[in-house]
Image (cartoon, coloured by chain):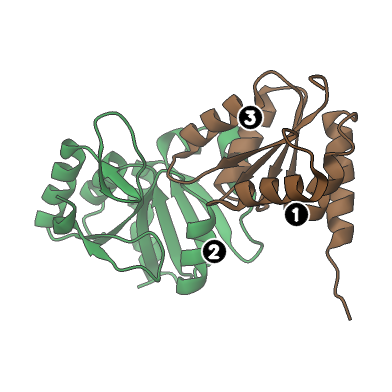
Amino acid sequence: MTLSLVRVDDRLIHGQVVVGWGHALGAKQLVLVDDEVSANEWERDIYRVGVPPDMTIEFLSVEQAARRVSDWEASSKRTIVVLGDVAAVVRLCELAPHVKRVNLGGIHPAPGRRQRLPYVFMSDDELSALTALAARGVDITAQDVPTARAVPLRELA
Amino acid sequence: MNNSVQGIVVSHARLAEGLVDAVAEITGERGALQPVSNEGCSRAVLGQRLAEAIGARPAVVFVDLPGGSCLQAAIAYLRAHRDVAVVAGVNLAMLVDFVYHRDLTPAGAAQRASEVGGRAVRVVE
C-alpha cells in the first residue's frame, strides 16, 4: 500500500507536509483534497508554488478523491493526501471506507474550538465526528511531524 | 519616513523576530522591518496578520522559504494589492542592505534585495 498518509491540516500544503512528511515517507505525490481549492485556478497556483521538482501535486474534490483512493493504494508512487478540516476527512472516509488511518496534523483555533494539543484545536462536534469514525475502525492519531509521538484520538477528549 | 517602503519579514517560528532584531543590532535602524510569524495559525489568520502588519504603506514582504504557508499568504496578499512585492528566501544580508535603500519602489527594492541576498550566499574557502 502506498497511500502513505491521509492528513487533516488547515494549512494544506506547507513545510511540515512537503519537507517533514515528504522526506520521511519518501512520498512522490501530493494530493490536495478541498472542494474550494480544486475549483479555483488562482488557489491552485498558490499551492503549486514550492512543490519540489521531484514531487507532483494534484487537486481534487472530496468526491473525486474518494474514487481515486484505490488507485493510490495500488500505485508504486507513495502518496500524501491532505484535507483542510475534519468534515472533509469524515466525508472522504464515508465515501472511501477502505481509508483506515487518519493523521491530525494541524487544526488551528476557530470559534467553538478548544485546544487539545498545541497544534490541534477542535470543537466537541468535530471530536464526536472523529470518534464515530474511529468506532467504524479508522485509526486516528494526532502527529504534526514524523519525529513526534502519535497521540491517539482518545487522548484528545 | 512614512513614504519609505517598509519591510515585512514572514517566517516559521521566531526566525522573523530574530532577523529583525539582528538587523537593528547591526544597523541601529529600528522600525524599518516588522516580523510576522506563522506560529499557531491557519493560512487565513496568517493572511490577517500580514495585512495588519502592512497596513496602507508600500511594502516588500520577505518570506523565509520559497514555498509553504508563509509564501502562500504573501502571494495571496500580493494578488489583491498594489505597492507590494515579495522576496522568498530571506537572509540577513539582504535585510541589512534593504534598510538603507527604502527610497526605491517595492519592485525595485525587492529586485535589489534578491540580488544582494543571492550574492551573500557563497562557499568560503
Residues B11 and A76: in front is: B11
Amino acid type assigned to the residue bearing label 3 in the image: Tyr
Q: Tell me: B97 left or right of B19.
A: right
- Chain ID, brown in image: B
- Element assignment for label 2: helix
Evaluate whether residue A137 shows in this view.
yes
Q: Is residue A89 above or below residue B105?
A: below
Evaluate whether residue B88 shows in this view.
no
Amino acid type assigned to the residue bearing label 2 in the image: Val
Residue B33 drawn at (x, y percent):
71, 37
- Chain ID, green in image: A
Distance Cα–Cα, label 3 vs label 2: 24 Å
- Point out which mark residue B77 bears: 3
- Element assignment for label 1: loop
Q: Chain of mark 1?
A: B
Location of mark 2 (residue): A19
Residue A122 drawn at (x, y percent):
25, 41
